[in-house]
Amino acid sequence: MQFEILGPLRVTDAGPVKVSGQRRRILLVALLTHANSAVSNEELLDWLWPRCPPRSAQATLHVYISTLRRALEPYREPWQPAERLLTHPTGYLIKVADGELDVLRFERLLAAATPALDEGDAQRAYELASEALAWWRGPALADAAAVDAARGEITRLEELRLSAETVRVKALLALGRHRDVVPELTRLVAHYPLHEPFYVLLMIALSQCGRRADALAVFRRARTVLAREVQVAPGRDLRRTEAAIVAGELD
């Protein structure tokens, strides 16, 4: 069985597994963000009814769990114990085997890509980071995007996504593929206008393509965006990159 939450929830097991109902989908996402660990009833209720849970919330949670069990283990007889979605003294736990959850695959690949880049194996770093990013199909935990309890995990995953993008681009630059990476970095800068490392990498790529004026224009744009949106000046890396370009050190 494959669980995917780096985008809209998707469950497959020799074909799509239907998880109907928005709250049931949110419930499964909540459990998968704590895969192989118990999630308390209180936490689950906070995901499902963050502001005003109904009096029947606990009973409804039990019904949702039963529905999910039937979807995840359709051939289990009613008297047999569940093997996938387990009852725990404090709540519930979903068992996920190695390789079944996209988040865990993504994190494992990224954890291997970063040291590969640090050790100078740019080709392997590029391949691992690309494979990691291929698991993303949209915003993290898309079904729970409006749930306050999900925001911490969404932020964590999105930051890891930026790290993977950064490793991939740095690997391409190390491989001498400066021209190839300019369009991708231009897209990343447009999508993440407050993420300074992407401006730095785009400036380096442009400068090493012989486009010094364009690289300096990127710095000016970064300075304008940062001042307008968050009222800060460019950080040290941006300033140092600009100075190196002006001095001709990155051509």
Image (cartoon, rainbow, N blue to C red):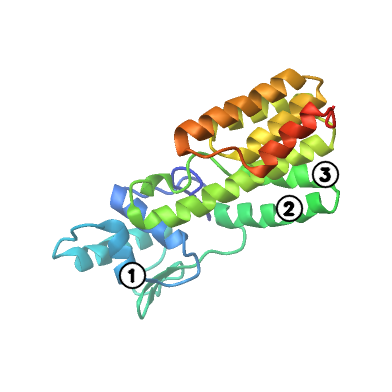
Which residue does the image show at 71% across and 35% down from the upper left? Answer: 201
Disc 3 residue type (three-letter): Ala
Choose the circle earlier in sequence order: 2 or 3. 2
Q: Which residue is mark 1?
A: 78
Which residue does the image show at 78% across and 26% down from the upper left? Answer: 207
Q: Is residue 204 left or right of residue 34?
A: right
Q: Which residue is mark 3?
A: 122
* Residue 41 locus on image (x, y percent): 31, 70
* Residue 153 locus on image (x, y percent): 46, 56
- Whole-angstrom CA distance, mark 2 to mark 3, is 10 Å
Disc 1 residue type (three-letter): Pro
Q: Which residue is mark 2?
A: 114
Quarter of image, res 224: top right
Q: Can you say which quadrant of the picture contains the C terminus?
A: top right
Front in this rendered view, residue 196 or 9? 196
Disc 2 residue type (three-letter): Thr
- Disc nearest the viewer among 3 and 1: 3
Q: Is residue 62 left or right of residue 80?
A: left
Q: Is residue 6 left or right of residue 246?
A: left
